[in-house]
Amino acid sequence: MQANVGRRIAIIGAGIGGLTTALAFAQTGADVTVYEQADALTEVGAGLQITPNGARVLNALGLDGALSRVGITAEAVCPMDAVTGRQIARFDLSNQSPTYRFYHRADLLGVLVDACRAAGVTIQLNTRIASITSDGRFMVDGAMVAPTLTIGADGLHSQMRALLNGPGRPFFTGQVAWRALVKRQDAEAKAQIWMAPNSHVVTYPLRDGMLNVVAVQERSAWAEEGWHHADDPANLQAVFADMSDDLQVILKDVTDVRLWGLFRHPIAGRWQQDGAVALLGDAAHPTLPFLAQGANLAIEDGLTLAACCQHEDSLQRALKSYQSHRQPRVTDAIAAANGNARNYHLDGIPRRAAHAGLGGLGRVAPNAFLKRLGWLYDYDAPKVHGFTPL
């Protein structure tokens, strides 16, 4: 069945989730337009990790060749003691299939943009959608647009989420995060998790000799949500001033940094309505950045939504199937991310016990760590949902 043929799909938001969704619908016969309020499709100063579950989706969309040219193949993930600089364990990623890679977000976005345009997707920039009706209609340049299906991929502050679920009530987690890039020509292809009492730092390499740095601190002082609030690098450096020399050498090279508060948003109760509107990615299920799954889950969402619609004449049934398949999985992933938020910041006896356990696992059963993530990394959304490009 190719039920998407001839459907007019409108996607609000040209982020990674929105563009993956656009490409999946276009490859199954839909007429797709993406509406983006920004005047250019750019991402500055941010890395991301695409784990095998996300890679399976991107490969099914025909992107592996282009992505292999801009990503770095991950060799390992290494928990570190940030206080002493000691490597606690090393867990091999080199045999992951599909390949686990590190990307600059702008590079992944660029590959998706090129593929979408090649597939006939219209990307309309500098277009802010002021309001959307419950049946998915909205105004653009004074004209009413009435798609077959309108999809909200419009992020944390999604107006479509509010349309379906009412105003949100996120709460501050008591944690803030900094994001930065530093020059590191000799960085190994590994993700290092530098764990300290009440704080941690994650580092991994990107193209052009850059190192992505995300640092998190527990504190009561509130910080605004969002990635783009400039901060003084000295504030970041002061938080980790008592940490190991190896970590401080990295942080001292930070010259431009962004700070944001980490807020926990509940998973939306309603992801779809009346076969006319649907949500995906952060609009439906924001997650904290402690499992490297925000982009991966949005990528899975996009293909799953397109596949459910591809195999179902009734969009109402298709959208209900989409939510019923995705909601349990993202709930488990978000719970795991929340657990990491605690485990990375242990202190005292619990910290020593956890580090000893990780070290023993790395020596005795190094594959066990990744096997525990099998439920996450081994998931094959294209196969599960029978995604079939035309």
Image (cartoon, rainbow, N blue to C red):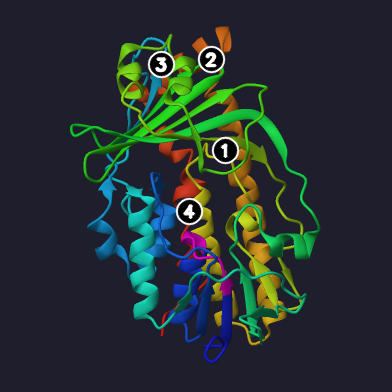
User: Where 96 sits versus 222, above or below?
Assistant: below
**Left or right: 246, with 300 as reference point:** left
Please say whether residue 344 is one of the residues in the magenta stretch. Answer: no
User: Where 389 sits versus 15, above or below?
Assistant: below
Find residue 320 and report its horizontal and vertical position in percent: 71, 71
Q: CA distance from mark 2 to mark 1?
A: 18 Å
Q: Say which mark, if any, is on residue 197.
A: 2
Q: CA distance from mark 3 to mark 1?
A: 20 Å
Q: CA distance from mark 4 to mark 2?
A: 28 Å
- For image coordinates 37% across by 10% down, the residue present is 84
Dot 3 or dot 2: first in sequence order is: 3
Residue carrying label 3: 81
Observer-nearest of 325 and 105: 105
Residue carrying label 4: 296
Secondary structure beneath dot 3 equals strand
Q: Quadrant of the C terminus?
A: bottom left
Q: Residues within 10 Å of mark 2 (few under 14, many from 20)?
A: some
The reply to whether discs 2 and 1 touch (Cβ–Cβ < 8 Å) is no
Dot 4 or dot 2: first in sequence order is: 2
Q: Amino acid at mark 2?
A: Pro
Magenta segment range?
Answer: 11-17
Find residue 207 and report its horizontal and vertical position in percent: 25, 46
The reply to whether discs 4 and 1 touch (Cβ–Cβ < 8 Å) is no
Q: Amino acid at mark 1?
A: Ala
Dot 4 or dot 3: first in sequence order is: 3
- For image coordinates 60% across by 56% down, the residue present is 155
Q: Amino acid at mark 3?
A: Asp
Please say whether residue 16 is one of the residues in the magenta stretch. Answer: yes
Dot 2 or dot 1: first in sequence order is: 2
Q: Say which mark, if any, is on residue 337.
A: 1
Find residue 40 and report its horizontal and vertical position in percent: 43, 64
Secondary structure beneath dot 4 equals helix
